Image (cartoon, rainbow, N blue to C red):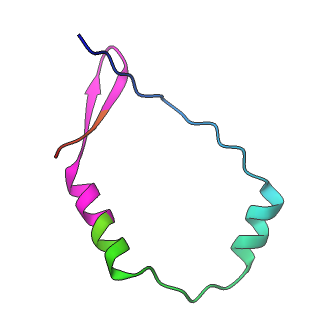
Amino acid sequence: MIKTTTLKSINLEIDSEELLCFSNEEHNEEPRQHVIDNLLRFSRALKITPSKLVGTIESVMN
């Protein structure tokens, strides 16, 4: 039997000064259409189910 788990949180090391500098800059760029299409397809395929044992189960339905 294959067992999988989902982490409840992910710790990413992000420099707060770099993030603040990035947020203060004005960006007029928009994502390309294929990026938007991929995100929409992913969001339709993503299924999140609550679980008493592990909190939530995230799966991508293909």
Res. 61 image quadrant: top left
Q: Residue furthest right?
A: 17
Residue located 38% across and 22% down the image: 5
Res. 44 image quadrant: bottom left
Residue located 54% across and 86% down the image: 29
29 is higher (above) or lower (below) than 42: below
Q: Position of residue 23 (x, y in %)?
A: 70, 72
Position of 21 with respect to 52 (left or right) is right
Q: Quadrant of the N terminus?
A: top left
Q: Give the mark count.
A: 0
62 is higher (above) or lower (below) than 1: below
Residue located 79% across and 56% down the image: 16
18 is higher (above) or lower (below) than 6: below
Q: Residue furthest bottom?
A: 28
Position of 23 with respect to 36 (left or right) is right
Residue range (magenta) = 39-57
Q: Residue furthest left?
A: 62
Q: Is residue 48 magenta?
A: yes
Q: Residue furthest top?
A: 1
Position of 56 with respect to 19 (left or right) is left
Q: Position of residue 50 (x, y in %)?
A: 28, 28
Q: Position of residue 54 (x, y in %)?
A: 37, 19
Q: Is residue 42 magenta?
A: yes
47 is higher (above) or lower (below) than 37: above
